[in-house]
């Protein structure tokens, strides 16, 4: 039996590996604090759950249009108008089984064998694998040391005739950075100059702090026709298990991606689609409440991390992640801890906190904390982190 070359190129997801290890320890009765989580720790809001129950009772239990129910696509168009000042028609929308599924469909629809896709470091783990699965080549773009953002200069260095697209993720996983209008304008100019397709993953749009403004790059001049906006309900509405994401973009690309979807998943879950119509059109204050709670936790976590000697952590403006710089401890310890993976293993085994190594996101010298965890756990977890680092020296 032989396995495809494509699969051989894929690495198992480091975030899932951490979660599995942490769960195994928890199953043995060890009190592990898990900072590896990539999903809100809140339940889905009641008004959305009620809509799903009603959808079952009303027999919305069959295949839908491949692109998603028209009523849902209309609701998504309204959302884009209201939040992003973007005018789309239902024919510009594809509803899929999660934003992850949208991105895969889009990459399969636009990439030819050995096309290149610019991928800013640090990157969300699945982009890299999805580009490879689409038989394309990830071309990694280095960030600025000061702020994790990619400069126009670094993008330009990586441009070649083979580059087809660039992935932008703001607010960002794993760093929490949010690109400003000015920064996006610079990227947009390059996209126009070099005729790039932009895949703009905006799934953390609603989790944004300090009154920072979220700008969709698609709303900048000359960008709507070359941008695919990716969004979804997993993070904003705490609906990770319901599996629904959506893409908006030029009709030709959406139609091509729908050909892939039609022959792979057929459509997103019909009950979820009904519930998401309600989530978008009848939103109550639950999303804002979750956002405020995340902001409180972020403030606490960042202050504590920055109070640890030789730890620096940039203040994330969005999502629910923080990436402290731990490089001092990799150089300065007697325990043979040399890489971010070594440090995560050391902290998990001895101090029972699960973090994700920066190298999983293409960057060494950092670890990722997710603060999708209770205040109580965050307080205790940072104490353990500090103690672990001290004991390393
Ligand atoms: C940047 C980013 N995009 C997409 C996703 C996937 O979202 P979904 O649950 O809608 O597939 C995640 C989930 O962790 C993410 O962090």
Image (spheres, helix red, strand yellow):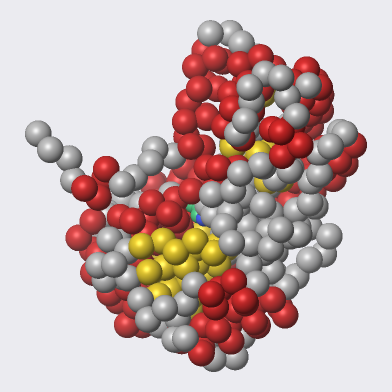
Residue 306 in view, yes or no: yes
Location of residue 60 with respect to 169 vertically, above or below: above
Q: Nearer the viewer, residue 386 or 275?
A: 386
- The residue that appears at 75% across and 53% down in the rendered structure is 316
Q: Nearer the viewer, residue 43 or 302?
A: 302
- The residue that appears at 51% across and 88% down in the rendered structure is 192
Location of residue 393 with respect to 96 vertically, above or below: above
In the picture, the quarter occupied by the N terminus is: top left
Q: Would you say 282 lies left or right of 302 here?
A: left
Residue at the outermost left position: 1
> Residue 390 in the image: x percent, y percent?
81, 22
In the picture, the quarter occupied by the C terminus is: top right
Q: Residue 338 occupies which quadrant of the picture?
A: top right
> Residue 311 in the image: x percent, y percent?
81, 39
- The residue that appears at 54% across and 54% down in the rendered structure is 123
Q: Would you say 195 lies left or right of 38 here?
A: left
Q: Nearer the viewer, residue 382 or 216?
A: 382
Location of residue 31 with respect to 152 vertically, above or below: above
> Residue 129 in the image: x percent, y percent?
38, 51
- The residue that appears at 77% across and 25% down in the rendered structure is 389
Residue 272 in view, yes or no: no
> Residue 145 in the image: x percent, y percent?
71, 58
Q: Would you say 101 lies left or right of 385 here?
A: left
């Amino acid at each position: 039996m032989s396995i495809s070359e494509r699969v051989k190129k894929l690495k198992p997801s480091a975030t899932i590996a951490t979660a599995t290890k942490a769960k195994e320890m928890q199953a043995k009765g060890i009190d592990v604090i898990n900072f590896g989580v990539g999903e809100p720790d809140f339940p889905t809001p009641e008004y959305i759950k009620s809509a799903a129950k009603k959808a079952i009772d009303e027999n919305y239990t069959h295949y839908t249009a491949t692109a998603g129910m028209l009523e849902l696509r209309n609701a998504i168009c309204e959302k884009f108008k209201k939040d992003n000042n973007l005018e789309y028609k239902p024919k510009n929308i594809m509803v899929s089984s999660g934003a992850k599924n949208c991105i895969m469909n889009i990459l399969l629809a636009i990439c030819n064998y050995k096309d290149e896709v610019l991928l800013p470091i640090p990157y969300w783990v699945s982009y890299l694998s999805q580009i490879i699965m689409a038989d394309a080549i990830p071309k990694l773009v280095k960030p600025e040391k000061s702020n994790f953002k990619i400069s126009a200069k670094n993008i330009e260095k990586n441009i070649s005739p083979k580059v087809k697209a660039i992935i932008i993720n703001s607010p960002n996983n794993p760093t929490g950075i949010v690109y400003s209008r000015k920064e996006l304008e610079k990227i947009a100019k390059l996209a126009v100059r070099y005729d790039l397709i932009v895949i703009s993953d905006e799934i953390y749009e609603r989790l944004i702090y300090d009154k920072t403004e979220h700008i969709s790059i698609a709303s900048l001049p000359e960008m709507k026709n070359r941008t695919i906006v990716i969004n979804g309900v997993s993070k904003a509405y705490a609906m990770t298990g319901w599996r629904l994401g959506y893409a908006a973009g030029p009709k030709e690309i959406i139609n091509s991606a729908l050909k892939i979807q039609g022959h792979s998943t057929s459509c997103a879950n019909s009950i979820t689609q009904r519930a998401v119509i309600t989530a978008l059109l009848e939103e109550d204050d639950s999303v804002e409440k979750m956002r405020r709670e995340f902001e409180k936790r972020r403030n606490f976590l960042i202050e504590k991390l920055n109070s640890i000697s030789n730890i620096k952590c940039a203040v994330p403006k969005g999502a629910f992640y923080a990436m402290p710089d731990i490089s001092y401890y990799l150089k300065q310890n007697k325990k043979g801890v040399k890489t971010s993976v070594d440090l995560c293993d050391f902290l998990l085994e001895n101090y029972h906190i699960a973090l994700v190594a920066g190298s999983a996101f293409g960057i060494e010298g950092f670890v990722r904390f997710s603060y999708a965890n209770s205040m109580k756990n965050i307080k205790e977890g940072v104490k353990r982190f500090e103690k672990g680092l001290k004991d390393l020296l």
